[in-house]
Image (cartoon, rainbow, N blue to C red):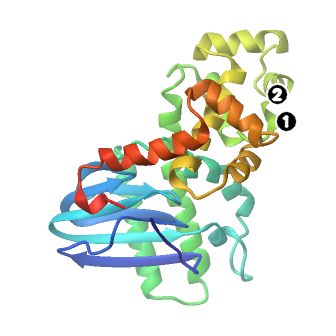
Amino acid sequence: MQIEHSGLSFELTIDTTNVWEKQAHKHSFFELVYIKKGKGKQCINHNTIDYKEGNIFFLPPLDCHSFIIEEKTTFVFLKFSDQLFEKSNSYEINTKNWFDDISYILRNYNKTTGNIINDQQDKDKVIKIIELIILENNNRDRFSSVIIQGLIIGLINILMRHIEQNIYRTAKPNNTKFNLIIKHIQNNLFNNEKLKIPFLANKFNVSKTYFSEYFKTNFGSSLNKYILISRLRVVETRLLYSDFTIKQIADEIGFSDTSHLSNVFKKYYQISISDFRKKGEYQLLKNSTLANCSV
């Protein structure tokens, strides 16, 4: 599998073409794809969907994708890395801490394929922001980097609104407090201190003795199980869409060692990590319906 790298913190490409010549590939950066004109099919992680004018797709690092073009298409590719949010000159703002807090969700949100924004008002906003980024990128001066940084921050916050709405669907839609608890857990999934019941109970004004029952009543499973399953979903994405070793994954997710991760994984999936990785990649390839999506 080819992994595309970029040495830049931000890169904008506009491409009008009748034929997609790249093989299916992954990147080491975030990429937003805006279909300005045209139609066809996109393959994301070996799932195939139609695309058309106005669609917006968001691809975290290590998502595999390619296109089959049915009608001449103008693509706008907006690529950025974590470095964009680090202050590199006196005009830029250091937003690294903000991006660190949300990057977990951006990297690991539900990877159901498709147009990420369905609300027309927000879609119009994103398209306007993209057009402003294009305009600023074509007429750069010493202020352009901070202006583009600010525009991308606005764009990401709109994306986060829709990603969080998808997360909230797992909870009761009218329970604002519980939705905020789910959001907090997802934003702090690897921070054990902020996931302890005393911290959560105090932050969300729920009795410590009642919190476990409150969570289970609203979600249908225990807090510990929800956290564990959420972490295992990250393990899944790492096994299927990265070249990380099991030790690297265990260290990142917060398991004490590879044996601990392997035992927990096998308990819940009824298959070893190594077999899951082999079988998972095989199934992804087997389920691909487009020859151009083969890897």
The residue drawn where x is 38% and y is 43% is 283
Quadrant holding the C terminus? bottom left
CA separation, marks 1 and 2? 6 Å
Q: Amino acid at mark 1?
A: Glu
Q: Amino acid at mark 2?
A: Lys
Label 1 with label 2: CB-CB less than 8 Å: yes
Q: Is 20 placed left or right of 232 in the picture?
A: left
Against 106, is 266 above or below?
Answer: above
How crowded is the residue under tag 2: few (<14 C-alpha within 10 Å), some, or many (20+)? few
What kind of element bears circle 2?
loop
The residue drawn where x is 80% and y is 28% is 203
Against 279, is 226 above or below?
Answer: above
The location of residue 230, given as percent across then percent down, is 62, 34
The location of residue 157, given as percent across then percent down, is 55, 53
Quadrant holding the N terminus? bottom left
The residue drawn where x is 74% and y is 58% is 97
Against 134, is 126 above or below?
Answer: above
Q: Is 218 placed left or right of 261 in the picture?
A: left
Q: Which mark is residue 193?
A: 1
Nearer to the camera, 4 or 207: 4
The residue drawn where x is 17% and y is 74% is 18
Residue 201 in which image quadrant: top right
The location of residue 84, given as percent across then percent down, is 62, 71
Q: Is residue 181 visible?
A: no
The location of residue 177, given as percent across then percent down, is 65, 23
Q: Which mark is residue 12?
A: none
How crowded is the residue under tag 1: few (<14 C-alpha within 10 Å), some, or many (20+)? few
Q: Is 272 placed left or right of 49 in the picture?
A: right
Q: Is residue 74 visible?
A: yes
What kind of element bears circle 1?
helix
Q: Find disc 2 in the rendering and name its residue.
A: 196
